[in-house]
Amino acid sequence: MSVSGAEDGVRRAIVVGAGPVGCLAAISLAKAGWQVDIYEARPDLRLPASKATTQQRSINLAISSRGIAALQAIDPAISERFLQTAIPMCGRMIHDIKGNQHSQLYDKDGQCIYSIDRALLNEGLLSEASMVPNIRLFFRHKVLAIDFDHRTMIIRSLDSEKDMRTAFHFCIGADGSYSITVMSLDDDETTGHSWRTPHRMNFQQEYIPHEYIELKMPAVHNEHGKPSFSLDPNHLHIWPRHSFMLIALPNKDCSFTCTLFAPTSELDRLATTGDILSWFKTHFSDALALLGEERLSYDFANNPRSPLITIKAEPYHYRDRCVIIGDAAHAMVPFYGQGLNCGFEDVRVLQALLQDCGVAPGSALPRLGKEVLADSRLSNALSRYTETRHEDLVAICDLAMYNYIEMRHSVTTPVYLFKKALDDFLYTISSWHNPSLEPTVRASIATIPFPTHRPSGWIPLYTMVTFRPDISYEAVRKKAARQSEIVTTVGWLGAVLVGATGFYWTLRVLRSTSSQR
């Protein structure tokens, strides 16, 4: 086993995972002065051989104000470049069982979310990271175990099949739902190494009894023979069917990436091509016409069925050695479109706390090892991250699960439509403007995690989650709960008033009838 370290005295950070969140975290650290190494077990996603695999199972991403605010806080130029490759979606387009379409706009101010291909976003961030001088990328390098007490990790090169022990000052675990960083923090037995002290992490992992499969809706050709969209590209399309649903997000090549979410038991019944086509004809006949029977059959046969998982953990850090972010810390179901946005927000919040605590990577620590002096400023920043971020991350995981029920069923019910209309009306009369759009608020988001502690006026839940990066997720949940109580109270009072009025007029009619006799 070879050994590498940081004998040059430069503070060295290792980011485990080269996904979008890991790349953005590496860029943030590098801009602050850290020497950053990124280790990724997969091949370079920019290589042609890697692209076919990534296209089979990645849900298209919807990036919204929280993710955009994070990109702008790290590097405004990156944000501008990525938005040029994204497609704005101003609302949901609901497709009912008869094929009728109904638009539900997201926001009274015309704010949009943006559809972007996961692979293109990841490739772009990899390219951005590779252009930063103090970032090094290592693909097909699998982290096997991490000793946070001695600040070392064991990494295997999958090309040479050789292991090496490498040293670090600071580690960011951005390695997804099945994180080796979390396993190394959680318990010795999971990694097979006993040379460290367990760190007593609380960890909860839950699979929901639903799965997803990705489908492709090809572009059509207009009268000039050029590719065009088969559906309105400025909406997120939803086919809600109570216990399951189909969604479609637009791509730059005029195709749509569709994702079918359904109970595992429902998908198990689709055993043959005939079963699949019959089921789609019954539930998604208009979508089937656009997907094409041959293409649909091919996608079902070749694209994997993937699980849906929720992860909650605490604490997110260990001393001044490590912090976990993104899906490693809080994997969530994708029904609020906040997985990526929340991961990017993790990076923004962490950067703000590192700056506020005065973490200075330019001041080198003594040689690496267990006896190295702790960085009290870094330890304080990471402690504050765990303390202030935990409630937010639990809140958005719960809200994401709740939104699945809304998307697959509630969006079609009269009660939901009434509440949405009431929400929009109260929002219009009580909130004259969106504070997060003001230049001073946008500027403060780069240095203050959440400038707005007590949002005023009436604000719909979806608006707060999606378009208000100045409000924390936990503040969103609390305000939404208060507003829901008000709506429920008003509803009961209205019902009582209607009942009392009906009873009064019934008595009047009975008395009138009695007097006439």
Image (cartoon, grey):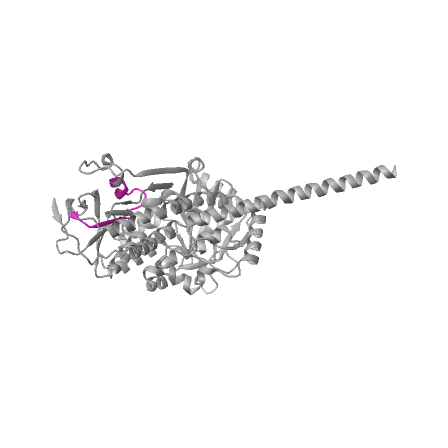
**What residue range appears in magenta?**
166-184
Residue 475: x percent and y percent?
44, 49
**Percent position (x, y) of residue 180?**
26, 42
Front one among 457 and 245: 457
52 on left or right of 11: right
Q: Quadrant of the C terminus?
A: top right
Residue lying at 12% horizontally and 47% vertically, measured from the top left: 3
Which quadrant: the N terminus?
top left
The answer to whether 316 appears left or right of 437 in the picture is: left
Residue 65 seen in the current view: yes
Residue 261 vs residue 389, the one in the foreground: 389
Instruction: State the residue at coordinates (52%, 50%).
Output: 94
Check the image and name the residue furthest to the right. Answer: 517
Location of residue 101 in the rendering, given as x and y in whole percent from the top left corner: 54, 52
Residue 284 visible in the displayed image = no
In this picture, is 450 found above or below 308?
below
Give the quarter of the image for residue 266.
Answer: top left
Q: Within the magenta stretch, is there residue 179?
A: yes
135 or 299: which is nearer to us?
135
